[in-house]
Each structure stands twice: as structure tokens, then as C-alpha cells.
Image: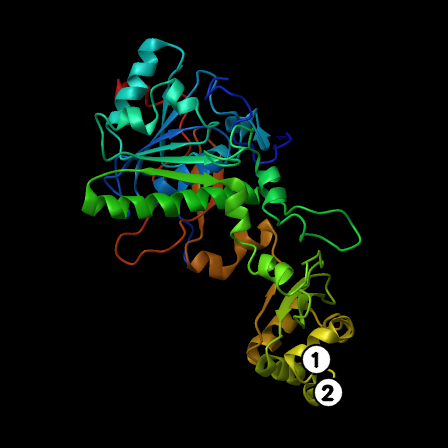
Amino acid sequence: MTVSRTPDAMIDSVSEPIDDHVETSTTTATPDEAAGPLAGVRVLELGNFIAGPFAGQLFGDYGAEVIKIEAPDGDPMRHWGVTLDDSSLWWPIIARNKRSVVADLKNPGELALVQRLASECDVILENFRPGVLSKYGLDRETVARTNPGVIVTHVSGFGQTGPRASEAGFGSIGEAVGGIRHTTGDPDRPPARCGVSLGDSLAAMFAVIGTLAALHERASSGLGQEVDVAIYEAVAALMESSMVDFEVGGVLRQRSGGALPGVAPSNAYPTRDGSEVLIAGNADTVFARLCDAMGRPDLAGDDRYATHVARGAHERELDALVADWTRTVDSDDLLALLREHSVPAGRVYTAADMLTDEHYLAREMIERHVSRTGVDTPMLGVVPKFSRTPGAVRDVGPTLGEHTDLYR
């Protein structure tokens, strides 16, 4: 097994498209066995990497037929991240429930195939630079002449309009411009990133939300529209009251490590066996229960800690008190004690913890499927859960061009 560097959530950095307690599930169905609330919806996926394709993954999870157009050399995600024999272990996940159709858009005959598919789809999902779709007659104005109900969902770094629209979009840049990098990390260090492609994933989720809203509206109007998702805006949407805090309150949020300023105790605390447990005991009633669990009921009546504001003002010393207690207890015993006192808490999980956690298993959040290369691949299940029309992982990442003949 080799590890190759996964890029910072790249959208499309060139001006050309494509070419420029329940047992875990082990059953793999085919995409034809449609299930889920989006069964009957057809999505044409144009794009590479993460932001667009993750949205396509979600559409497929919910039962849509997702036709992924790939250049002859395929989506780079087939070979990025952790690889086994040059095949990405991520690919069966991000490409699950999709059909792979190979088409070189510079080839008139193959472009005609894609244009025909566009005229037959409910949704065109793309993450090229603005303007690329129109170059190939795949823009909404053109496609709507024969398919007025088509919804074209764009995912790009800076959106389809504005002075930066033509710039290449990366998830990492969206995280910076969206504001979240400034508030992530320790205050005495440069901005940090979380260990996943957060900007791209947020943009993908907003793309799905926006597309579903457009599909709902189309049910009454019969008309499609464009959904314009910019990565930086998807990130900025998470920034809570930071702008009004600054402009009106005169407070500029800063990096604060593992805690939020003024919210205490709410942090990851060390345990005797080397784990870390996140404890959220910042509400007054919860803090009182935490004090009982600690054997320190007197703290709840201490003027320094008796109110939310007081605890926030003495955050560091309170965190030290809690940590001094937690490091004397093994993590399992600590979690059991906190549950007994109804204090929200959870071990800081790694992938190893997730794979064996009884709650993950009971909610069917760990599924196992055999990839096209024969690898037993654990992956997260479908989110959210539907009571009547559940989504499903019906198939894993297809081989390059596996379904091309199906659509000719």
C-alpha cells in the first residue's frame, strides 16, 4: 500500500473540462435496483475531484441515477489519496452508486452523446470553471431549448458571477476566504485546517440542498433553473454571528484552540489511559451535574463558576480543574460516570474507533462492500436515515467507462 498526497480539495484548476449492534452490510446491489427518495431522478455529473463528485455521491445514495462523464484517462480521484496498486481506496466511496461513461468532449461524436444525455436528465451537476459548459453547448440556456425542466447545478470556487468568478477554485482557498481558517487552530500559531476537505464537502452539501429545492419548485412550475454554489460562500454560511460580532459588537473572533471563548467547560480532556474525552458541561444545570460527578458539588456554587458568564471568564482555570480530575480516570469509566450524571460527553474518535463502535453499527453507519479491484472496503452508510424510502449503497465505484455502451 502506498500513500499519495491528496490535494487541497481541488475543483477544476484548468480551463478545460474533464480532459484538460447490527452486522455491517456486505451486500452490493446494482444501480438498476433503484431505492431511495430520489428514485427516478437522473443526474449527469460533469467534473472531477471532490466538490461536484461528493454531491453526486449523495444524489446516488438517495436513489438518483447518476451518470458520471469521465475523460479517457478518468477522474484523478481514481488514483489519489491512499492507494493500493495505484487504485484509490477512496474511489469506491466517492463514486458509489454511479455509472461511468467515457467521453472526450473535444470529439464531436462523443460530445453529441453527452449533449443528448443532458437533454434527458433532470439535473446537470458540474464543477468546471464558469463558462466551460457553454463552450460545449451544455449550458442551461442551450440545453433548456429541448429540456426546459433541466436544473444546472454549478459548484465553483467563487461562483458564476463577480470579479473573481474566473479564478481557479480550491477548497482550501474557499476555507480561507470564507473565514473558517482564521478561526481554526491555536492562537499562537498560524491558521490550521481540519484533516478533511471541509470546503469542498460543504459546497457539495449546499449543492444537493439547492438542487432539491429547485426540484421541488419545478414540480409546480415545470421549469428548471440554475443553482450557483461557491465554495467560499458555503464556508462563510457556517460563520455564525462573526460579522455582526465585529461590526456591531467590536469583537473579532480569533483562533481559540479546542474551545470557544466564553464557553466553559467545553473541551477535550485527557484520561488516565491516554484517551481524550470531549465534555460539554457549559450549561448551568449540566455544569452542576458535572460537579456532582467530579465529587466537587461546591464548584457549582462558587461565584467564579456559578453562571455561564463567570465560567467563561475563568475558562482556563476551570479547564485545568476538570483536566486534573479526568486524568485520574480511565476513559470508559469516565464516560460511564458522565452518562450516569447526564453530562454530554464522547471519546475523541479515530477511524479505528468508528469501525467498532456499537452505536455506529446499530445505526448501520458502517457498510462493507467489495470494490471492483477485490478490496473489502468499509465505508460510512447513508446520511440521513429515511423511514419509508431509505437510501442505499447499491454499488461501488465503477471501472472507467464501465457503462459507456449502456448509453450509446
The residue carrying mark 2 is 303
Q: Would residue 326 be found to the left or right of residue 62 on screen?
A: right
Q: Would residue 64 be found to the left or right of residue 230 on screen?
A: left
Q: Position of residue 66 (x, y in %)?
A: 33, 33
Q: Would residue 127 be found to the left or right of residue 393 on screen?
A: right
Tell me how many marks there are. Answer: 2
Q: Secondary structure at mark 2?
A: loop
Disc 2 versus disc 1: distance between alpha carbons? Answer: 7 Å
Q: Secondary structure at mark 1?
A: helix
Kind of residue at badge 2: Asp
Number of other residues with Cα within 10 Å of mark 1, as a class: few under 14, some 14 to 19, many 20 or more: some
Residue at image position (19%, 47%) is: 220
The residue carrying mark 1 is 310
Q: Which residue appears farthest toward the top when viewing the image?
A: 108
Residue 94 showing in the rendered view: no
Residue at image position (24%, 43%) is: 218
Q: For this rendering, which residue is in front, 374 or 162? A: 162
Label 2 vs 1, first from the N-terminus: 2
Name the quadrant of the C terminus.
top left
- The numbered disc on residue 132 is none
Number of other residues with Cα within 10 Å of mark 2, as a class: few under 14, some 14 to 19, many 20 or more: few
